[in-house]
Amino acid sequence: MTLERPPLFTKKRDVLTFLTFALLIFSLSIIHKYHAYQTLTTFDDAIIKVHVINQYLKTTKKKEYFVLKVRSENSTFYTTTSKHARDLTGRDIELKVWVSKLTFFKFIEGYYLYSHITKVYPERDAKSTLAHHISTQHHSQISAELFAALYTASPMSRELRERLSALGTSHLLAISGFHLGILSAVLYFLFKLPYSLLQQRYFPYRSSNLDLFVIVMLFLTTYLYFLGAIPSLMRAFVMLLIGFILYDRGIKVISMQTLFLTCILLLAAVPTLLYNIGFWLSICGVFYIFLYLIHFQSNSYVWTLVSLSSWVYLMMLPISLYLFETFSIYHPLSILASILFLPFYLLSIFLHVISQGGILDGFVEYYLSLAQSPKTISLPLYVIVTQLIVSLIAIKSKKLSLALLLFCLFVLMSSIHHVAEF
């Protein structure tokens, strides 16, 4: 007989204490943001150094121009430049920006500024250099984009994003907890043997789990910094850290309380995440994983893998259709793609390390070709709001979880029927 791990919060007082602590962090974060806002808007214009995250061409009836997504020391915003500008992705540039109309709420939410480029620094960052090295191993542009995005979170073209959305596999390219979990496991097993040999000889009194976790987290921290603190990856990183701390102290990890703790702490520390869709999609994905594990756990690894992948796909389908409005007859194959992604991901890493990444191009291009002529399917907002409310109530009800499953199956069947009609 094994003792059940206790939950993190056992009394209302514990929750109130945590929320008070989170409110304090949130207040400090807002004060810091407001100070940065005041500094930026001291005058009607300012000279700032920014890093170009993405650059893409936008065409209107009147003209063509480049949109730049840039990150300054305290915020991320958009600006525009001439269509004749060179590729600035991954470079640091100096901008003269006009900020007289910028409000503090826009500063938090995300904003656009009129600007003029005053200086371009010559060197690209390490992430762009690695993305370029990965791209050179591939024969087609779309494969190069896909693998660069998979390893370095590089921006993808609209065509690639639409194809992935139509196939239901956008989540596999968005670096998040799935990728972090794989990397954590790989790093753990790589370091386990040499650490064990050293431990037996020099420090048998040390906790191997704790030491290996610290080593892995140091590598993951470097990876997070290298990629630029992607919201979904940040969520996974913080949750991994919190999960280990709870596990090490004998507290239940697979719990909605863990997700609640992670979500509130991140929003308190980084208020701009409130407006980030990637962050909320990541939270929803973990929520439905936990909802499955709470009500439908199985001792069979294979059954859990297949049923959990199917469950998460179905639960996220209405949300995906509401946000992206894209579906194809091959969309349900993303369940199989999610199951096969682990060996594909590990194999692709190995092939790119030995500079043979192009071997997978034929397979990738064939799979992406299945996304030709996707259809548009729209769901009203009230459907998604109802689903989310029912999902929260279903935490305490297995029957309601099954009802939710039937609803999502109905959405899937309706979507397939809609596509088959054309």
Image (cartoon, rainbow, N blue to C red):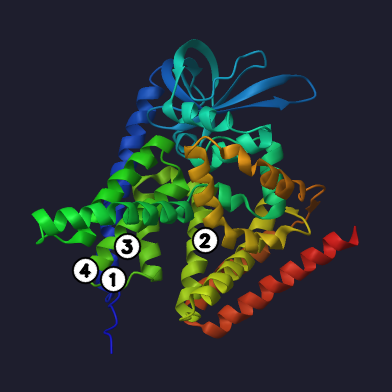
Question: Alpha-carbon neighbours of circle 4 within 10 Å: few (<14), some, or many (≥20)?
Answer: few
Q: Is residue 170 left or right of residue 397?
A: right
Residue ID for mark 3: 243
Where disc 3 sits, the SS reads helix
Could you say where residue 106 lies in the image, as x and y percent from the top left?
Answer: 50, 35
Looking at the figure, which quarter contains the N terminus?
bottom left
Q: Is residue 315 left or right of residue 127?
A: right
For badge 2, the amino acid type reads Cys
The answer to which of marks 2 and 1 sits earlier in the sequence is 1
Q: Which residue lies most toward the top here?
A: 118
Q: Which mark is residue 249?
A: 4
Please identify, in this view, whether the residue under mark 4 or under mark 2 is nearer the observer: 4
Where disc 1 sits, the SS reads loop
Where disc 4 sits, the SS reads loop
Q: Which mark is residue 284?
A: 2
The answer to which of marks 3 and 1 sits earlier in the sequence is 1
